[in-house]
Image (cartoon, rainbow, N blue to C red):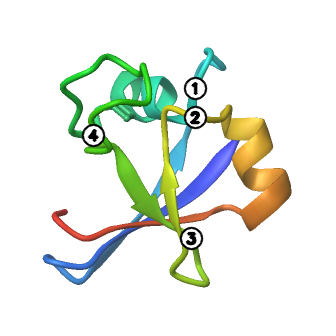
Amino acid sequence: MRIELKGVASQTTRILTLKRHSNSLMDDLIATGVPIASSCSGELICKKCQVLTQGEACVLSCSLTTKQYIESFGNEIIVNYL
Ligand code: FES
């Protein structure tokens, strides 16, 4: 699955091809080398794994699969600290 990752801090855009499809978007991003913050390992507690959609809605990347994210929000992901 192809994802366009925009980093707000660096003002850069990277095109990623996610190689595996795990239980969550967070795990797929981490497996591709994207540093997604987390202190609860995807248990929906810490809320550190937030990403922004193209419409700038906050989404917990551990709360849905990559496929669910793309179906709901498209293939663009925005991360403020990148
Ligand atoms: S990793 Fe903690 S809420 Fe997503």
C-alpha gap between disc 3 and disc 1: 16 Å
Q: Which mark is residue 53?
A: 3
- CB at disc 4 and ligand 1 closer than 8 Å: yes
Q: CA distance from mark 1 to mark 2?
A: 7 Å
Q: Earlier in the sequence, mark 3 or mark 4?
A: 4
Q: Which mark is residue 24?
A: 1
* Residue sticking out furthest to the front: 45
Q: Which residue, given by chain and number where applicable, does mark 2 sit on?
A: 63
Earlier-in-chain disc, 4 versus 2: 4
Please tell me whether residue 26 is drawn above or below residue 81 in the rendered image. above
Mark 1 or mark 2, which has the lower sequence index? Answer: 1
On whether ligand 1 comes within 8 Å of the CB at mark 2, the answer is yes
Q: Are marks 1 and 2 in contact (CB under 8 Å)?
A: yes
Give the crowd class for mark 3: few <14, some 14-19, many >=20 residues within 10 Å: some
Question: As shown in the figure, which amino acid type bears the numbered disc 1?
Answer: Ser
Amino acid type at circle 4 is: Ile
Q: Quadrant of residue 18?
A: top right
Mark 1, residues whose alpha carbon is within 10 Å: few (<14), some, or many (≥20)? some
Label 2: which secondary element: loop
* Residue 29 percent location from the top left of the image: 43, 35
Determine contact: label 3, label 2, CB under 8 Å: no
- The amino acid type of the residue labelled 3 equals Thr
In percent of the image, x 27 and y 40: which residue is there?
36
As drawn, the label of residue 36 is: 4
Question: Dividing the picture into quarters, in which one does residue 9 lie?
Answer: bottom left
**CA separation, marks 3 and 2?**
14 Å
Which badge, 3 or 2, is on the more N-terminal residue? 3
Residue 45: x percent and y percent? 34, 30
Q: Secondary structure at mark 4?
A: loop
